[in-house]
Image: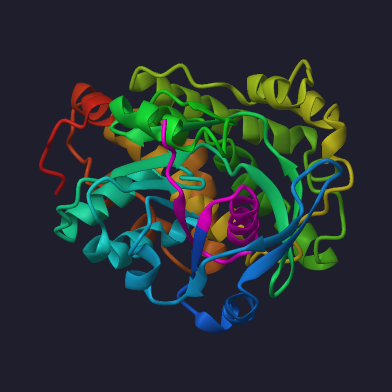
């Protein structure tokens, strides 16, 4: 099999720089796109990124083809387009790239959060995009990484297994085969309903931040987020949110992992309840809380993760009172309306689809009028 050789990474944040450097070190021709050229000017001049890593991990100077703020130039030769931006930017990226897409290109959102691929697909349709491309999403980001400088990146860990799904799911195998030479860690994720509704950040991040709002503001985050922040009462709220998520998933025929099952799968930790299991996860010790409430755990995870799950639940008559309470508190704290800006069923173009129509859309891409 001949694998794609030309990759374009969209987004030059922590993750985008790490992915760009790693792909380059694996021998791919990589173009890095960022809408603000000043953020990639040093990379453009050096024609690459220095990558540091854990012992045995990828490291060295990743020489790239180009770094550009011209989207037409960035996509001209792209075979695989890796979107590595906050999920709040997915719709904007879809709008920007739609006029420049070509038949046969693969788009992978890293990650999609909840229904990122659906939002991307709907946005492209509304833009009148006719290119025959595959839109797909990862359940979570493959790297734990950070930026060490304008042209430096560091990878702390590469996840061993990351589910991905294409929209429609019948094309997932095409994506997996295309990138298996560089990312064998990507595995079959069933469909985008599975990857979206197994988004554990929706459960842990917003509620834990909001319920510790006073402590975050008074200490600037100087406490252990998952250990000090997850008290028995806070854990009860997380469990309630998790039950609602699992129930919404069940309503559309999906057996979603519970938070307890996810902790066992990801970290091999157990507990009689969520409070005990979280405190048994040694990796959570030492992780500090956000220093401010102006943090992606609220401004990204509420509209792009919690809102779409709650909105889908309401569409199918599922009680999501706990989710609704966290979303409304977030709206008050940030003086905004996350139901207006977030991924509601209306904005996703799936309002009024029956459950069977929604499942068909996710699995086979049957054409509906995504209004």
Front residue of this view, candidates 224 and 151 = 151
User: In x, y percent, where is residue 100?
Assistant: 26, 64
110 sits left or right of 269 in the view: left
Q: Is residue 208 in view from this perspective? A: no
Q: Residue at x 33, y 64 (%)?
A: 76
**Going 26% across and 58% down the picture, which residue do you hit?**
101
Q: Is residue 37 left or right of residue 317?
A: right
Residue 56 in picture, x, y percent from top left: 83, 40
Closer-to-camera residue (310/325): 310
Name the quadrant containing residue 226: top right
**Per the image, is 28 magenta?**
yes
Quarter occupied by residue 260: top right
Report if residue 325 is visible in the image: yes
Quarter of the figure with the N terminus: top left
Q: Nearer the viewer, residue 277 or 363?
A: 363
Residue found at x 52% / y 63%: 332
> How are the colours assigned in the image?
rainbow
Position above or below: 169 against 44: above
Q: Is residue 274 above or below residue 220?
A: above
Outermost residue to the front: 2
Asked if the magenta segment contains residue 132, the reply would be no
Question: How many numbered discs, if any?
Answer: 0
Left or right: 45 as drawn, with respect to 199? right
User: Which residue is painted at 21% across and 32% down in the image?
Assistant: 365
46 versus 342 height, above or below = below
> Seen in the image, is 369 located left or right of residue 349?
left
Query: What is the x, y in percent for residue 109?
Result: 45, 48
* Stretch of the chain drawn in magenta: 1-29
């Amino acid at each position: 099999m001949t694998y794609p050789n030309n990759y374009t990474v969209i987004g030059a944040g922590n993750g985008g720089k790490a992915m760009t450097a790693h792909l380059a070190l694996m021998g791919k021709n990589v173009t890095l796109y960022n809408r603000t050229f000043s953020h990639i000017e040093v990379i453009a001049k050096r024609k690459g990124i220095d990558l540091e890593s854990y012992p045995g991990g990828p490291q060295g100077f990743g020489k790239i083809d180009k770094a550009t703020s011209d989207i037409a130039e960035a996509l001209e030769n792209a075979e695989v387009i890796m979107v590595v931006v906050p999920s709040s930017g997915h719709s904007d990226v879809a709008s920007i790239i739609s006029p420049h897409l070509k038949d046969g290109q693969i788009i992978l959102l890293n990650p999609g959060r909840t229904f990122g691929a659906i939002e991307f697909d709907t946005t492209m349709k509304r833009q009148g995009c006719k290119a025959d491309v595959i839109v797909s999403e990862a359940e979570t980001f493959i790297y734990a990484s950070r930026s060490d400088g304008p042209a430096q990146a560091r990878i702390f860990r590469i996840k061993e297994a990351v589910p991905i799904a294409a929209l429609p799911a019948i094309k997932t195998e095409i994506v997996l085969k295309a990138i298996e030479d560089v990312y064998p860690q990507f595995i079959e994720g069933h469909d985008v309903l599975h990857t979206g509704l197994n988004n554990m950040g929706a459960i842990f991040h917003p509620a834990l931040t909001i319920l510790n709002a006073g402590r975050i503001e008074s200490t600037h985050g100087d406490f252990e987020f998952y250990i000090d922040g997850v008290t028995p009462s806070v854990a009860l709220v997380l469990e309630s949110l998790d039950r609602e998520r699992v129930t919404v998933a069940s309503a559309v025929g999906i057996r979603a992992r519970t938070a307890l099952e996810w902790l066992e799968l990801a970290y091999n930790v157990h507990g009689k309840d969520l409070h005990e299991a979280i405190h048994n996860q040694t990796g959570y010790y030492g992780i500090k809380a956000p220093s401010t409430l102006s943090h992606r755990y609220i401004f990204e995870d509420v509209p792009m993760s919690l809102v779409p799950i709650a909105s889908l639940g309401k569409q199918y008559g599922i009680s999501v009172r706990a989710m609704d309470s966290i979303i409304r508190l977030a709206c008050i704290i940030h003086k905004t309306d996350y139901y207006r800006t977030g991924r509601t069923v209306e904005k996703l173009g799936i309002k009024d689809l029956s459950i069977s129509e929604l499942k068909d859309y996710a699995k086979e891409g049957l054409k509906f009028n995504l209004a």
